[in-house]
Amino acid sequence: MAIDEAGEAAAEARAAVIGGIARAAKLAQRDSAGVTLIAVSKTHDATAIAPLIAAGQRDFGENRVAEAQAKWPDLRALHPDIVLHCVGQLQSNKADDAVALFDVIHSVDRPSLVTALAKAIDRQGRRPDCFVQVNIGDEAQKGGCTIADLPKLLETARTAGLPIAGLMAVPPFDIEPAPYFALLAKLARDHGLQGLSMGMSGDYETAVTLGATHVRVGTALFGSR
């Protein structure tokens, strides 16, 4: 694909997603400016990412620290206003690297990670916003704390001084996501949190109607892998 064709395709894909966010926000009588679109760029190289940056996208999400370290320093040198989000599971031994690299961490899900992140923040003086991940569908294969453990984990995170921005969740696959999004929104309200990181390519409009402040969109922006 030629460079100008790639740029045009990226701009069209981004405009379509932004349009979907705007429609959903209007339905919910919300301001779409309150929704951050995160382009999930995991497995995509700099060549694939550059057209989206050129189209105006500035928030990007990565799953793995090592992959992000390999490609984002050069891209951010050219575009220092980029905001980088860690949207995948994070090992405690990667906490220092994550705090150094990411501006937002969406997957705080256990006390050991809270401790590791708090120490890294103290050492580095960087304070990335943190979302506590909830295993909203109680699925054994997914990360996230249980709903029952959420109050204690939030207390631990707040006591440790983590800047908690909100809650994150991934609903079960192939099940209507709306009840899970609504439940996460209720949990956030119950705990005095504003941020809701929920919704992906197939369901971000539903998530926005139910209060999402951050949507994590990959396929709808980059195409199928």
Image: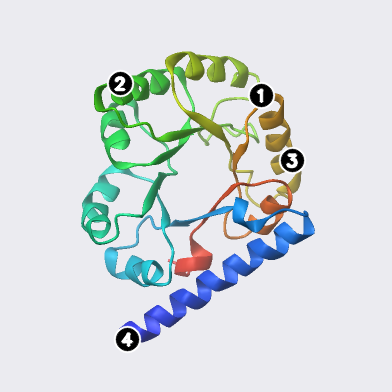
Amino acid type, label 3? Ala
**Mark 1 lies on residue:** 191
Which residue is found at the position 51% from the left and 77% from the top?
A: 12
Residue 210 vs residue 29, the one in the foreground? 29
Which is more N-terminal, label 4 or label 3?
A: 4
Q: Is residue 30 left or right of residue 109?
A: right
Disc 1 from disc 2: Cα separation:
25 Å
Secondary structure at badge 3 equals helix
Q: How far from the left and from the top, in percent, is residue 209? A: 73, 52
Mark 1, other Cα within 10 Å: few <14 / some 14–19 / many ≥20: few
Amino acid type, label 1? His
Secondary structure at badge 2 equals helix
**Mark 3 lies on residue:** 182
Which residue is found at the position 31% from the left and 29% from the top?
A: 95
**Mark 4 lies on residue:** 2
Residue 1 seen in the figure = no
Disc 3 from disc 1: Cα separation:
14 Å
121 vs 175: above or below:
above
